Image (cartoon, rainbow, N blue to C red):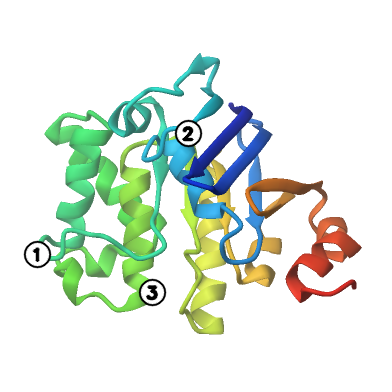
Amino acid sequence: MLELRAVSKAFGGIVVADQIDLKLAPGEALGIIGPNGAGKSTLLNLITGMVKPDRGQVIFDGRDITRAAPEERSRAGIGRSFQIPQPFDSLTAFENLLVAAMFGGQLSEHEAVQHCGNMLALTGLEARANTPAGALPLLDRKRLEMARALATRPRLLLLDEIAGGLTDAECQSLIATIRDIGAEGVAIVWIEHIVHALLAVVGRLVALDFGRVVMDGEPNAVMQSDEVQTIYMGVPA
């Protein structure tokens, strides 16, 4: 479904993506870990078109989208959430989804209303449908980020540290929601520092450091590797 071919990006002398090769199968759940500054969020920005690579290609569903605008990628089936929720604060939760469904998902108003109702149910926001987004507590703002991305009808969902700032109980609730999304056949790429949450969902883990892929494989094997532990600890494991 998704392939990055030798994707590289630098801001001046700072390399944030260094010859990244990555493949994702339809319906797969992939976790991305790495210390701060490793290039994780930049990787999502390269996939969504918010940042253009200096070299390399981004292929989605067999199509080269390297130079495609973010809105083209959204309409092609790529949705994302942001680390800091960015809803339209003065609109209700339902209205936020409606915007996404009609402009990102290109649904008619009638189709969008039904679809958005389904997404509110999937993400546990039905009771908050008429609440202004700016008045939602953090967990529900995180859920709204996911719901709004899902309203565009993505086949690939990118999640950027969506569990950050949540209590353990809230985190468990979020994990259940993400599992439900994966069960619907949506492929997931999830960046997260809350590793236990990540390991509860993903079937594969990629470790980044200084913009390069350090390890790619079975989640527990990646976490237990000396190289990954050294990256996080700063000294040989």
The numbered disc on residue 155 is 2
Sequence-first disc among 1 and 2:
1
Q: Could you tell me how far apart the alpha carbons at marks 1 and 2 are, in whole angstroms?
A: 28 Å
Q: Is residue 23 left or right of residue 58?
A: right
Disc 2 is placed on an element classified as loop
How many discs mark residues in the rendered view? 3
The numbered disc on residue 139 is 3
Q: Residue at x 34, y 76 (%)?
A: 138
Task: Let me know if residue 190 appears in the view.
Answer: yes
Q: Quadrant of the N terminus?
A: top right
Judging depth in this view, the residue of 118 and 217 nearest the camera is 217
Amino acid type, label 2: Arg
Sequence-first disc among 2 and 3:
3
- Residue positioned most to the left: 90
Q: Residue at x 21, y 61 (%)?
A: 93
Q: Quadrant of the C terminus?
A: bottom right
Instruction: Tell me if mark 2 has few (under 14), some (14-19) or many (20+) residues whose alpha carbon lies within 10 angstroms of its own.
Output: many
